């Protein structure tokens, strides 16, 4: 499954490269690109996979086993033939609302959807806080050297670099297999 340390590294890379002050959707799209094209390595440093990801995956919402509407998870990472899922919800630092609860709702919806397909699944959830545009949360990066481009010289301006991104694990659970084990006990 997607490890927190790998997700931390990707979020840091996205935030460092983009800098602060972008809309939430810009960071989410960049993270999606990082997830799709990051080639993770196992302990032996051999390439093992490139994650399959869904952007704004629509998930059914049920009340007492009755369909009542849809929710939309920001990013859903699929692994191992759709038996392992990671739900990622991205928010800008300082956003209002109970975003951990939102991740749990998407995880339950995804679990129910997979259970109806009679699949044993493992689902984990993360809440990713992207940088705010608050000036106190920024640090200035040294300007880059002069660059020759088409015979002219240009100096890159200082870029604001964020230091307030965070990846928060929300939950990790196994569907069906866990229930079957609990029922036998």
Image (spheres, grey):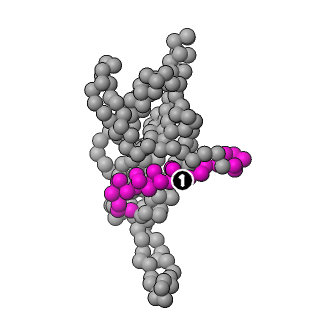
User: Hey, which residue is sitting farthest right in the picture?
Assistant: 44
Residue 57 location (% of width, % of height): 39, 40
- In percent of the image, x 49 and y 32: which residue is there? 123
The image quadrant where one finds the N terminus is: top right
In the image: residue 12, left or right of residue 49: left
In the image: residue 29, left or right of residue 10: left
- In percent of the image, x 41 and y 25: which residue is there? 112
> Is residue 71 visible to the viewer in this orientation of the structure?
yes
Under circle 1, the secondary element is helix
- In percent of the image, x 51 and y 50: which residue is there? 36
Residue 36 shown in magenta: yes
- Classify 10 Å Cα crowding around label 1: few (below 14), some (14-19), many (20 and above): few
User: Hey, which residue is sitting farthest bottom in the picture?
Assistant: 151
> Is residue 168 visible to the viewer in this orientation of the structure?
no
Instruction: Work out whether residue 165 or residue 76 is closer to the camera in this orientation and state it.
Output: 76
* Residue 181 in which image quadrant: top right
Magenta stretch, residue numbers? 20-46
Instruction: Work out whether residue 108 or residue 117 is closer to the camera in this orientation and state it.
Output: 117
Q: Which residue is mark 1?
A: 37
Q: Where 162 falls versus 101 (above or below)?
A: below
The image quadrant where one finds the C terminus is: top right
Q: Where 72 falls versus 114 (above or below)?
A: below
Residue 152 location (% of width, % of height): 46, 88
* Residue 162 in which image quadrant: bottom left
Q: Where 120 falls versus 159 (above or below)?
A: above
Instruction: Work out whether residue 109 or residue 54 is closer to the camera in this orientation and state it.
Output: 54
Residue 68 location (% of width, % of height): 27, 26
């Amino acid at each position: 499954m997607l490890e927190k340390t790998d997700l931390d590294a990707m979020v840091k890379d996205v935030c460092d490269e983009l800098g602060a002050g972008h809309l939430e959707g810009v960071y989410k799209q960049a993270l999606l690109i990082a997830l799709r094209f990051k080639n993770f390595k196992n302990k032996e440093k051999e390439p093992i996979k490139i994650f399959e990801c869904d952007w704004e995956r629509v998930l059914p919402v049920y009340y007492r086993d009755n369909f009542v509407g849809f929710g939309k998870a920001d990013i859903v990472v699929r692994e191992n033939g759709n038996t392992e899922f990671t739900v990622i919800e991205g928010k800008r630092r300082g956003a209002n609302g109970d975003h951990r609860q939102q991740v749990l709702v998407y995880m339950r919806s995804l679990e129910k959807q997979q259970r109806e397909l009679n699949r044993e699944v493992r689902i984990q959830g993360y809440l990713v806080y992207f940088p705010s545009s608050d000036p106190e949360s920024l640090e200035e990066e040294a300007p880059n050297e002069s660059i020759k481009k088409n015979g002219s010289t240009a100096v890159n301006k200082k870029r604001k670099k964020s230091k307030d991104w965070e990846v928060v694990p929300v939950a990790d659970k196994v569907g069906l297999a866990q229930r079957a084990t609990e029922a036998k006990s």
